[in-house]
Image (cartoon, helix red, strand yellow):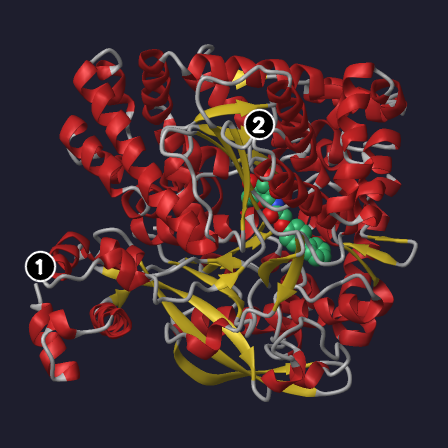
Amino acid sequence: MTRLNDLALSAYGRPLADLSNQQACSMLQDLVKERSAALAPTAGKRRLYYISAEFLLGKLLTNNLINLGLYEDVKAQLEDAGLSLSEVEECEVEPSLGNGGLGRLAACFLDSIATLGLPGDGIGLNYHFGLFRQKFVQNQQLALPDAWLGEEDVLVGGREAFQVPFADFTVTSKLYTIDVLGYGRKTKNRLRLFDLVGVDDTLVPHDSIEFDKREVRRNLTLFLYPDDSDEDGRLLRVYQQYFMVSNAAQLILAEAVERGSNLHDLADYAVVQINDTHPTMVIPELIRLLEEEHDMAFDEAVNIVSRMVAYTNHTILAEALEKWPLAFIERVSPQIAAIIRKLDARIAKNYDDPAVQIIQDGVVHMAHLAIHYGISVNGVAALHTKILEESELSSFYRIYPEKFNNKTNGITFRRWVMGCNPPLAHLLDTTLGSEWRTTGDLTGLLDHADDQDVLSALADVKADAKGRMRAFMLENQGAHIPEDAIIDVQVKRIHEYKRQQMLALYIIWKYLDIKNGNVPPRPITIVFGGKAAPAYTIAQDIIHLILTLSTWIANDPDVAPHLQVLMVENYNVTAAEHLIPAADISEQISLASKEASGTSNMKFMLNGAVTLCTLDGANVEIADLVGEGNIYTFGASSEEVERLYAEGSYDARSYYRRPGIKLLVDFMTNPHFIAMGSAERLRRLHDDVAGKDWFMALLDLEEYIQVKEAVYRDFEDRGAWARKELVNIAHAGTFSSDRTIAQYNGDIWHLG
Ligand code: 26M
């Protein structure tokens, strides 16, 4: 392999040992670029296009070095020169082109598609500002623009691509490419990111994410999900979506023709996976292009497109199921609106169930369009798919049972163990041999469940990860974590259904219990991380509660030595890579039925955390695999929850009135506590939890407290805990995204 020292001499005229971290970082990025430029694109007649409004990539350097097989060698050479790869990679800015689970899933999928050698590319938008950067000021979230592009150099190409016709004007797009490498593969795939020619970054001030939303011709690709709390923002989203799918459709047709398609056989050349409903307009856009630009009859175009599009559903939350007023679509593209009307008319003619119409009261239901005119609809965990079939989408399931299928989510082991936890990867190699790196099979560990050497090596791996995490928290925000603390983590977007507020109520309980003299045997550090949508008031209030509790407890000398509450600032993929390997306990406490799958649950498990969870999403599958004794479950079942909603019979007040619960909820508004924070936020959250509690935190709170106490007690039996860790890792292979992608390919895509 290349001598990095020679590279340094030729690039900077200095030996490797004299490079700054920044210089070493750019040099390695160039090396990766050169290596990947030499790889040929994965070939195949039929190609997958994974269209997604989000790709939450995270830093790319380590991942690319791993996939190119250069990682160990580069690390060693850097170390010989007195540099450290982890410090070098800190210079890289992470592309945060996603909000959370759905965007990170897309990134894991690209890695697996390339690793399996399947011909498939991602298509999305080149947002100039990724998900906002989160700062904490006065214990509240401040949202700042994330100008990742200014500093980054991962994009190649940037060629003018297509014309996109909007109602009142036509724009030109620019196409950027990020190479996607597979693990140990000689071919590559690509992430195609479309940008707008003429986009104007100066519309965004440097200290705020507000901008003029009406200037579409200059702002179209500036932001990932501009705030959609007002009409201008929502209209801009429709513009973005149409821009994304028009480019996607034009690219798909051009490439199919290049590979020899006559377009009548397009479905043999391309298959499109639409990631949630955001790219659904690709259906009418493909039809439009086949009709208008390629003289195809409408019926034939509809027929072809309906055989090449598949839809993934990621949520049952009504507010996240996209519905656009037809009038909006009309303003963006009258042709698309006209095609949607025709597609709707066919459905209206054939089915009289009002629940399956595409246009209802002038509103377009994007999911309905995708289901009627696609080959497949899948949920992302077994329970989620069952809920889609039996309740949320039951009217569709009755018409098209054959279209429904489950694809339980997965995570790429390259990033979520090899990249973020090299000591664990090494232990797996020495215990099992290195085949797990490609098969994902870790069950061989079960043969070592009582092997004291392996268990103690596992304890060392965890201690090591905790050391790296403590250093990260110190560096990131000056937080000191005690060395022997139990690490209990909830990281994910802040949302009422995920119930960060329930963990906050537990913290209040624990605080009072310690005040009463019940001192835990070792310090407990509870770590939160996550961003709240700027327009989502209650989520902001929850952040404020957590941060205020953090300060309150840190200031109490009776409690601070035993209980610490931290919230990592600007939680992102990089922070996740530091936190997850260090966790002892993985908090997965959504209200049953609401979390479609979850994927951090899988990342924690793979890194040896024990899960504390409700029976929701993929937690159900984790529980089935690891078995009782290796997971802690609590709370109402999804059936109970669905019944409570159906009957409208959940009464938050009746739980609030229980003295043990009232004490905890009212703590939020106790005059001393409130004096530390914002009375407005704390009162609003208090009243919401006590009076409405739409996601039923109070319903499960008492059992949650009991089970959490049991978890902490069990942690003290260090031998038994190490065994639980091992069993969890051993079963994590099921959640490799390589498995998920092999299933998508076998059941839906049929590539290669
Ligand atoms: C919609 C309208 C306006 C603005 C934003 C949105 C929107 C953006 C992202 C709605 C939902 C979005 O993402 C949903 C998401 O991340 N879902 C998660 O998907 C994961 C991968 O399948 C699952 O593991 C999680 O359970 C699910 O919550």
Q: Secondary structure at mark 2?
A: loop
Instruction: Please state the horizontal and vertical placement of residue 348, each as a whole percent of the image.
Output: 85, 49
Identify whether 175 is placed above or below 507: below
Give the amino acid type for the residue marked by disc 1 in the picture: Asp
Instruction: Please state the horizontal and vertical placement of residue 706, each as a whole percent of the image.
Output: 62, 13
Viewer-proximal residue, 143 or 305?
Answer: 143
Residue 51 visible: no
The residue located at (40%, 54%) in the rendering is 475
The residue located at (41%, 72%) in the rendering is 177
Asked which quadrant contains residue 418, the reply is top left
Asked which quadrant contains residue 729, the reply is top left
Q: Residue furthest front?
A: 557
Asked which quadrant contains residue 173, the reply is bottom right
Determine whether the beta carbon of the residue marked 1 sits less than 8 angstroms from the nearest atom of ligand 1. Answer: no
Residue 693 visible: yes
Give the amino acid type for the residue marked by disc 2 in the picture: Asp
**Horizontal relation, residue 196 to residue 594: left or right:** left
- Mark 1 surroundings: few (<14), some (14-19) or many (≥20) residues within 10 A: few
Viewer-proximal residue, 557 or 453?
Answer: 557
Viewer-proximal residue, 61 or 121?
Answer: 61
Determine whether the beta carbon of the residue marked 2 sits less than 8 angstroms from the nearest atom of ligand 1. Answer: no
Give the numbered dot on residue 558.
2
Identify whether 572 is placed above or below 387: below
The alpha-carbon separation of the residues under discs 2 and 1 comes to 47 Å
The residue located at (70%, 42%) in the rendering is 545
State the residue position of label 1. Answer: 80
Disc on the earlier residue, 2 or 1: 1
